Image (cartoon, grey):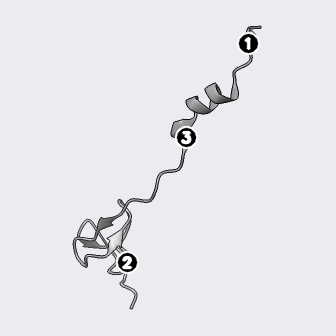
């Protein structure tokens, strides 16, 4: 079985994992009501997705 010849240092391992961080939630504006919504989700304010009413609007 293959075994590493030398121990991987903490710095080298951490440099490799720098892109594993959590990204922030980006939002887009709803085309119907202008509310800030996460992409590819139903708008919670007006209940539309791709300009079609999917759920009844909550008031």
Instruction: Give coordinates of residue 24: x percent, y percent.
Output: 46, 56
Q: Position of residue 56 (x, y in %)?
A: 36, 83
- Which callout, 2 or 1, points to the residue nearer the camera? 1
- Label 1 secondary element: loop
Query: In the structure shown, which secondary structural element does the residue marked by tag 2 occupy?
Result: loop
For the point 38% across and 64% down, the residue is 38
Rate crowding at label 2 as few (under 14), some (14 to 19) or many (20 or more) other CA atoms within 10 Å.
Answer: few
Q: Is residue 25 above or below residue 53?
A: above
Rendered residue at 38%/59% (across/down): 26
Mark drawn on residue 55: 2
Gap between marks 2 and 1, in whole Å? 59 Å
From the top left corner, tell me how far across and down residue 50 is, in percent.
Answer: 26, 65
Judge by depth and name the residue closer to the eye, 43 or 37: 37
Q: Which residue is mark 1?
A: 6
Q: Quadrant of the C terminus?
A: bottom left
Label 3 to label 1: alpha-carbon separation:
24 Å
> Is residue 28 depicted above or below 48 in this figure?
above
Report whether 20 appears left or right of 40: right
x 37%, y 77%: residue? 55
Going by the image, does 18 lie left or right of 48? Answer: right
The residue at which mark 3 appears reads as 20
Q: Residue furthest front?
A: 11
Residue 36: image quadrant is: bottom left
Q: Nearer the viewer, mark 3 or mark 1?
A: 1
The quadrant the N terminus occupies is top right
Q: Secondary structure at mark 3?
A: helix
Left or right position of 5 against 47: right
Q: Is 58 above or below relative to 16?
A: below
Q: What whole-number distance in Å separates the C-alpha atoms at marks 2 and 3?
A: 36 Å
Dot 1 alpha-carbon crowd within 10 angstroms: few under 14, some 14 to 19, many 20 or more = few
Q: Nearer the viewer, residue 18 or 36?
A: 18
Mark nearer the N terminus (3 vs 1): 1
């Amino acid at each position: 079985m293959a075994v590493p010849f030398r121990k991987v240092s903490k710095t080298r391992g951490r440099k490799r994992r720098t892109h594993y961080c959590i990204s922030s939630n980006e939002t887009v504006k709803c085309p119907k009501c202008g509310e800030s919504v996460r992409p590819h989700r139903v708008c919670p304010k007006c209940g539309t997705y791709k300009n079609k009413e999917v759920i009844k609007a909550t008031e």
